[in-house]
Image: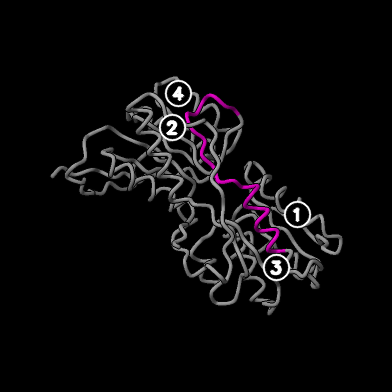
Protein backbone atom coordinates (compact mmCIF):
# COMPACT_ATOMS: atom_id res chain seq x y z
CA UNK A 1 0.00 0.00 0.00
CA UNK A 2 1.32 3.45 -0.86
CA UNK A 3 1.78 6.03 1.85
CA UNK A 4 0.36 9.55 1.67
CA UNK A 5 2.48 12.25 3.24
CA UNK A 6 0.65 14.81 5.34
CA UNK A 7 2.46 18.12 5.75
CA UNK A 8 1.70 20.46 8.62
CA UNK A 9 3.06 23.95 7.98
CA UNK A 10 2.97 27.13 10.05
CA UNK A 11 5.05 29.08 7.56
CA UNK A 12 6.74 28.34 4.27
CA UNK A 13 8.90 25.58 5.78
CA UNK A 14 7.26 22.35 6.88
CA UNK A 15 7.14 21.78 10.63
CA UNK A 16 6.61 18.01 10.32
CA UNK A 17 5.97 15.38 7.72
CA UNK A 18 4.01 12.37 8.90
CA UNK A 19 3.19 9.20 6.98
CA UNK A 20 -0.51 8.44 6.64
CA UNK A 21 -1.85 5.26 5.06
CA UNK A 22 -3.85 5.85 1.88
CA UNK A 23 -6.97 3.73 1.38
CA UNK A 24 -6.38 0.84 -1.01
CA UNK A 25 -8.97 2.15 -3.47
CA UNK A 26 -7.51 5.64 -3.67
CA UNK A 27 -5.86 7.05 -6.77
CA UNK A 28 -3.03 9.55 -7.07
CA UNK A 29 -5.00 12.63 -8.02
CA UNK A 30 -2.47 15.23 -6.93
CA UNK A 31 -2.14 17.66 -4.05
CA UNK A 32 -4.77 19.69 -2.21
CA UNK A 33 -3.50 22.51 0.02
CA UNK A 34 -5.62 23.26 3.10
CA UNK A 35 -5.01 26.69 4.63
CA UNK A 36 -6.79 27.85 7.81
CA UNK A 37 -6.30 30.07 10.84
CA UNK A 38 -4.59 28.64 13.93
CA UNK A 39 -5.63 25.21 15.16
CA UNK A 40 -5.56 26.59 18.69
CA UNK A 41 -9.19 27.36 17.87
CA UNK A 42 -10.94 23.95 17.62
CA UNK A 43 -13.25 25.29 14.91
CA UNK A 44 -10.37 25.79 12.51
CA UNK A 45 -8.79 22.49 13.49
CA UNK A 46 -12.10 20.75 12.67
CA UNK A 47 -12.04 22.39 9.22
CA UNK A 48 -8.54 21.10 8.52
CA UNK A 49 -9.28 17.61 9.81
CA UNK A 50 -12.52 17.37 7.85
CA UNK A 51 -10.97 18.61 4.61
CA UNK A 52 -7.95 16.37 4.96
CA UNK A 53 -9.99 13.24 5.67
CA UNK A 54 -12.24 13.77 2.65
CA UNK A 55 -9.33 14.64 0.34
CA UNK A 56 -7.51 11.43 1.26
CA UNK A 57 -10.69 9.41 0.73
CA UNK A 58 -10.98 10.90 -2.75
CA UNK A 59 -7.38 10.04 -3.62
CA UNK A 60 -5.44 13.27 -3.02
CA UNK A 61 -2.34 14.06 -1.05
CA UNK A 62 -2.74 16.95 1.36
CA UNK A 63 -0.68 19.74 2.82
CA UNK A 64 -2.08 21.56 5.87
CA UNK A 65 -0.92 25.11 6.49
CA UNK A 66 -1.79 27.73 9.12
CA UNK A 67 -1.80 31.48 8.46
CA UNK A 68 -2.61 32.70 11.99
CA UNK A 69 -4.92 35.38 10.55
CA UNK A 70 -1.85 37.14 9.12
CA UNK A 71 -2.43 38.19 5.48
CA UNK A 72 1.31 38.37 4.79
CA UNK A 73 1.85 34.85 6.08
CA UNK A 74 -1.17 33.71 4.07
CA UNK A 75 0.36 35.22 0.94
CA UNK A 76 3.58 33.26 1.57
CA UNK A 77 1.58 30.05 2.03
CA UNK A 78 -0.17 30.62 -1.30
CA UNK A 79 3.23 31.05 -2.94
CA UNK A 80 4.32 27.78 -1.34
CA UNK A 81 1.18 25.97 -2.55
CA UNK A 82 1.73 27.32 -6.08
CA UNK A 83 5.41 26.31 -6.02
CA UNK A 84 4.47 22.79 -4.88
CA UNK A 85 2.08 22.45 -7.80
CA UNK A 86 -1.09 22.11 -5.73
CA UNK A 87 -4.12 21.08 -7.76
CA UNK A 88 -6.52 23.05 -5.55
CA UNK A 89 -6.58 25.18 -2.41
CA UNK A 90 -9.13 24.92 0.41
CA UNK A 91 -9.06 28.18 2.35
CA UNK A 92 -10.48 29.81 5.46
CA UNK A 93 -9.04 33.22 4.74
CA UNK A 94 -7.15 35.89 6.65
CA UNK A 95 -9.19 38.90 5.55
CA UNK A 96 -11.94 39.68 3.07
CA UNK A 97 -9.91 42.36 1.27
CA UNK A 98 -6.37 41.16 1.87
CA UNK A 99 -7.04 37.67 0.47
CA UNK A 100 -8.25 38.73 -2.98
CA UNK A 101 -4.76 39.14 -4.45
CA UNK A 102 -3.56 35.73 -3.21
CA UNK A 103 -6.60 33.89 -4.61
CA UNK A 104 -6.19 35.75 -7.91
CA UNK A 105 -2.51 34.78 -8.01
CA UNK A 106 -3.41 31.12 -7.55
CA UNK A 107 -6.08 31.38 -10.25
CA UNK A 108 -3.55 32.91 -12.64
CA UNK A 109 -1.29 29.92 -11.92
CA UNK A 110 -4.13 27.55 -12.82
CA UNK A 111 -4.94 26.58 -9.23
CA UNK A 112 -8.61 26.96 -8.19
CA UNK A 113 -9.50 28.06 -4.66
CA UNK A 114 -12.47 26.86 -2.63
CA UNK A 115 -13.28 29.11 0.33
CA UNK A 116 -14.97 28.06 3.55
CA UNK A 117 -16.30 29.95 6.58
CA UNK A 118 -15.31 33.44 5.41
CA UNK A 119 -16.03 35.23 2.15
CA UNK A 120 -13.76 37.54 0.22
CA UNK A 121 -14.88 40.90 -1.14
CA UNK A 122 -14.81 39.95 -4.84
CA UNK A 123 -16.68 37.34 -6.86
CA UNK A 124 -15.42 35.38 -9.85
CA UNK A 125 -11.96 34.70 -8.44
CA UNK A 126 -12.61 31.73 -6.16
CA UNK A 127 -14.56 28.80 -7.61
CA UNK A 128 -16.64 28.33 -4.44
CA UNK A 129 -17.32 30.39 -1.34
CA UNK A 130 -19.13 28.09 1.09
CA UNK A 131 -20.05 29.83 4.32
CA UNK A 132 -22.39 29.36 7.22
CA UNK A 133 -25.50 31.52 7.11
CA UNK A 134 -24.07 33.80 9.77
CA UNK A 135 -27.00 36.19 9.72
CA UNK A 136 -29.56 33.40 10.16
CA UNK A 137 -27.41 31.84 12.89
CA UNK A 138 -26.97 35.13 14.71
CA UNK A 139 -30.71 35.65 14.71
CA UNK A 140 -31.18 32.20 16.27
CA UNK A 141 -28.65 33.08 18.97
CA UNK A 142 -30.19 36.48 19.57
CA UNK A 143 -33.69 35.05 19.92
CA UNK A 144 -32.43 32.61 22.56
CA UNK A 145 -30.52 35.41 24.29
CA UNK A 146 -33.65 37.57 24.44
CA UNK A 147 -35.61 34.67 25.90
CA UNK A 148 -32.95 33.93 28.52
CA UNK A 149 -32.72 37.61 29.43
CA UNK A 150 -36.49 37.83 29.92
CA UNK A 151 -36.53 40.67 27.34
CA UNK A 152 -34.91 43.12 29.77
CA UNK A 153 -31.56 44.03 31.33
CA UNK A 154 -28.15 45.48 30.57
CA UNK A 155 -25.90 43.37 28.37
CA UNK A 156 -22.48 43.35 26.72
CA UNK A 157 -21.49 42.31 23.20
CA UNK A 158 -18.05 40.92 22.38
CA UNK A 159 -17.39 41.28 18.65
CA UNK A 160 -14.89 39.39 16.47
CA UNK A 161 -12.07 40.79 14.35
CA UNK A 162 -13.12 43.99 12.64
CA UNK A 163 -11.48 42.92 9.34
CA UNK A 164 -13.54 39.73 9.29
CA UNK A 165 -16.81 39.96 7.37
CA UNK A 166 -18.42 37.40 9.68
CA UNK A 167 -17.91 39.64 12.71
CA UNK A 168 -20.07 42.37 11.20
CA UNK A 169 -22.70 39.98 9.85
CA UNK A 170 -23.15 38.26 13.21
CA UNK A 171 -23.35 41.56 15.06
CA UNK A 172 -25.98 42.82 12.63
CA UNK A 173 -27.99 39.62 13.04
CA UNK A 174 -27.85 39.96 16.81
CA UNK A 175 -28.98 43.58 16.80
CA UNK A 176 -31.76 43.13 14.26
CA UNK A 177 -33.41 40.96 16.92
CA UNK A 178 -32.22 42.45 20.22
CA UNK A 179 -32.85 46.08 19.26
CA UNK A 180 -36.56 45.33 18.95
CA UNK A 181 -36.70 45.07 22.76
CA UNK A 182 -36.46 48.52 24.38
CA UNK A 183 -35.68 47.14 27.84
CA UNK A 184 -32.56 45.36 26.62
CA UNK A 185 -29.75 47.92 26.89
CA UNK A 186 -26.23 47.41 25.52
CA UNK A 187 -23.87 48.66 28.24
CA UNK A 188 -20.68 47.95 26.26
CA UNK A 189 -19.53 46.62 22.91
CA UNK A 190 -15.90 45.71 22.28
CA UNK A 191 -13.89 43.56 19.91
CA UNK A 192 -12.05 40.65 21.48
CA UNK A 193 -10.66 39.55 18.08
CA UNK A 194 -12.06 35.99 18.31
CA UNK A 195 -9.59 35.38 21.17
CA UNK A 196 -10.26 33.58 24.46
CA UNK A 197 -7.50 35.55 26.18
CA UNK A 198 -8.88 38.86 24.94
CA UNK A 199 -12.40 37.73 25.82
CA UNK A 200 -11.26 37.21 29.41
CA UNK A 201 -9.41 40.53 29.59
CA UNK A 202 -12.18 42.57 27.96
CA UNK A 203 -14.85 40.95 30.14
CA UNK A 204 -12.83 41.60 33.28
CA UNK A 205 -12.50 45.31 32.43
CA UNK A 206 -16.11 45.71 31.29
CA UNK A 207 -17.42 44.03 34.42
CA UNK A 208 -15.56 46.46 36.64
CA UNK A 209 -17.17 49.41 34.84
CA UNK A 210 -20.60 47.75 34.52
CA UNK A 211 -21.20 45.55 37.58
CA UNK A 212 -24.94 45.38 36.89
CA UNK A 213 -24.76 43.52 33.58
CA UNK A 214 -27.14 40.60 33.17
CA UNK A 215 -25.91 39.04 29.91
CA UNK A 216 -23.08 38.73 27.39
CA UNK A 217 -23.55 37.80 23.73
CA UNK A 218 -20.39 36.86 21.85
CA UNK A 219 -19.41 36.62 18.20
CA UNK A 220 -17.76 33.23 18.72
CA UNK A 221 -17.27 30.50 21.29
CA UNK A 222 -13.65 31.22 22.15
CA UNK A 223 -14.57 34.75 23.25
CA UNK A 224 -17.55 33.29 25.13
CA UNK A 225 -15.24 30.88 26.97
CA UNK A 226 -12.94 33.75 27.92
CA UNK A 227 -15.86 35.87 29.09
CA UNK A 228 -17.28 33.01 31.13
CA UNK A 229 -13.90 32.37 32.79
CA UNK A 230 -13.72 36.05 33.81
CA UNK A 231 -17.27 35.96 35.14
CA UNK A 232 -16.52 32.79 37.13
CA UNK A 233 -13.39 34.41 38.58
CA UNK A 234 -15.50 37.39 39.68
CA UNK A 235 -18.18 35.18 41.21
CA UNK A 236 -20.73 36.27 38.59
CA UNK A 237 -21.99 32.93 37.32
CA UNK A 238 -25.48 34.46 37.30
CA UNK A 239 -24.62 36.31 34.05
CA UNK A 240 -26.13 34.79 30.90
CA UNK A 241 -23.54 34.02 28.19
CA UNK A 242 -24.33 33.01 24.60
CA UNK A 243 -21.69 32.14 21.99
CA UNK A 244 -21.46 31.19 18.33
CA UNK A 245 -19.70 28.23 16.62
CA UNK A 246 -20.78 25.06 18.43
CA UNK A 247 -17.47 24.00 20.00
CA UNK A 248 -17.06 21.01 22.30
CA UNK A 249 -15.79 23.36 25.03
CA UNK A 250 -18.99 25.37 25.02
CA UNK A 251 -21.04 22.18 24.74
CA UNK A 252 -19.40 20.96 27.96
CA UNK A 253 -20.03 24.31 29.63
CA UNK A 254 -23.70 24.21 28.65
CA UNK A 255 -24.07 20.68 30.02
CA UNK A 256 -22.40 21.81 33.26
CA UNK A 257 -24.83 24.74 33.63
CA UNK A 258 -22.36 27.47 32.65
CA UNK A 259 -22.68 29.12 29.24
CA UNK A 260 -26.32 28.94 28.23
CA UNK A 261 -26.29 28.56 24.44
CA UNK A 262 -24.32 28.70 21.22
CA UNK A 263 -25.03 28.47 17.49
CA UNK A 264 -23.59 25.56 15.53
CA UNK A 265 -22.00 26.21 12.18
CA UNK A 266 -21.01 22.87 10.61
CA UNK A 267 -17.27 23.40 10.16
CA UNK A 268 -16.31 19.77 9.57
CA UNK A 269 -18.96 19.07 6.94
CA UNK A 270 -18.47 22.45 5.27
CA UNK A 271 -14.79 21.70 4.73
CA UNK A 272 -15.64 18.29 3.31
CA UNK A 273 -18.12 19.82 0.87
CA UNK A 274 -15.38 22.20 -0.33
CA UNK A 275 -13.11 19.23 -1.04
CA UNK A 276 -15.92 17.41 -2.85
CA UNK A 277 -16.51 20.47 -5.02
CA UNK A 278 -12.77 20.77 -5.70
CA UNK A 279 -12.76 17.15 -6.84
CA UNK A 280 -15.79 17.73 -9.08
CA UNK A 281 -14.20 20.85 -10.58
CA UNK A 282 -10.88 19.12 -11.21
CA UNK A 283 -12.64 16.11 -12.72
CA UNK A 284 -15.45 17.72 -14.73
CA UNK A 285 -14.58 21.43 -14.90
CA UNK A 286 -17.60 22.45 -12.80
CA UNK A 287 -18.90 22.10 -9.27
CA UNK A 288 -22.52 22.21 -10.42
CA UNK A 289 -23.12 24.89 -7.77
CA UNK A 290 -23.15 28.68 -7.58
CA UNK A 291 -19.97 30.29 -6.33
CA UNK A 292 -21.59 31.60 -3.13
CA UNK A 293 -23.32 28.98 -1.02
CA UNK A 294 -24.92 29.26 2.44
CA UNK A 295 -25.29 26.53 5.05
CA UNK A 296 -27.86 27.10 7.79
CA UNK A 297 -26.85 27.11 11.45
CA UNK A 298 -28.52 25.35 14.40
CA UNK A 299 -29.20 26.62 17.93
CA UNK A 300 -27.47 24.59 20.65
CA UNK A 301 -28.71 24.78 24.23
CA UNK A 302 -29.31 22.43 27.14
CA UNK A 303 -31.94 20.56 25.10
CA UNK A 304 -29.57 19.25 22.42
CA UNK A 305 -25.99 19.96 23.58
CA UNK A 306 -25.41 16.30 24.44
CA UNK A 307 -25.79 15.46 20.73
CA UNK A 308 -23.02 17.83 19.64
CA UNK A 309 -19.57 16.49 18.76
CA UNK A 310 -16.78 18.26 16.85
CA UNK A 311 -19.04 20.82 15.15
CA UNK A 312 -21.57 18.21 14.06
CA UNK A 313 -24.99 17.43 15.56
CA UNK A 314 -26.30 13.89 15.67
CA UNK A 315 -30.04 13.24 15.66
Q: Is residue 60 above or below residue 142?
A: above
Q: Could you tell me how far apart the alpha carbons at marks 2 and 3 are, in whole angstroms?
A: 38 Å
Q: Position of residue 227 (x, y in %)?
A: 65, 66
Picture quarter with the N terminus: top left
Mark 2, residue position: 78
**Residue furthest toward the bottom?**
235
Closer to us: mark 1 or mark 3? Answer: 1
Q: Could you tell me how far apart the alpha carbons at marks 1 and 4 are, in whole angstroms?
A: 40 Å
Closer to us: mark 2 or mark 1? Answer: 1
Mark 1 / mark 4, whichever is N-terminal: 4
Quarter of the image for residue 113 reads top left
Closer to us: mark 4 or mark 3? Answer: 4
Q: Few, some or many C-alpha atoms within 10 Å of disc 1 (few <14, some 14-19, many ≥20)?
A: some
Question: Would residue 209 appear left or right of 246 to someone viewing this image?
Answer: right
Q: Secondary structure at mark 4?
A: helix
Q: Which mark is residue 107?
A: 4
Q: Secondary structure at mark 2?
A: helix
Q: Which residues are magenta?
A: 122-145
Question: Would residue 4 appear left or right of 102 to someone viewing this image?
Answer: left
Q: Return the residue nearer the eye: 69 or 11.
A: 69
Mark 1, residue position: 177
Mark 1 / mark 3, whichever is N-terminal: 1
Count of numbered badges drawn on the protein: 4
Mark 4 / mark 2, whichever is N-terminal: 2
Quick check: is 126 in the magenta stretch? yes
Q: Few, some or many C-alpha atoms within 10 Å of disc 3 (few <14, some 14-19, many ≥20)?
A: many
Q: Return the residue nearer the eye: 290 or 138.
A: 290
Mark 2 / mark 1, whichever is N-terminal: 2
Q: Position of residue 51 (x, y in %)?
A: 38, 45
Amino acid sequence: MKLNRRHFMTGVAAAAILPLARPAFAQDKGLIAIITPSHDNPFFKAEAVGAEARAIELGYETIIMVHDDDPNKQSELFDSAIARGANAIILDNAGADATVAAVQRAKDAGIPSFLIDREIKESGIAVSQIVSNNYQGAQLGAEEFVRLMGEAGNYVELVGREADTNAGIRSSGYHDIIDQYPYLVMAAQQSANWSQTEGYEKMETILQANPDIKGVICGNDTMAMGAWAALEAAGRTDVIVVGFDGSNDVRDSILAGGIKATVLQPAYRQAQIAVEQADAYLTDGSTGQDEKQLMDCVLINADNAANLETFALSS
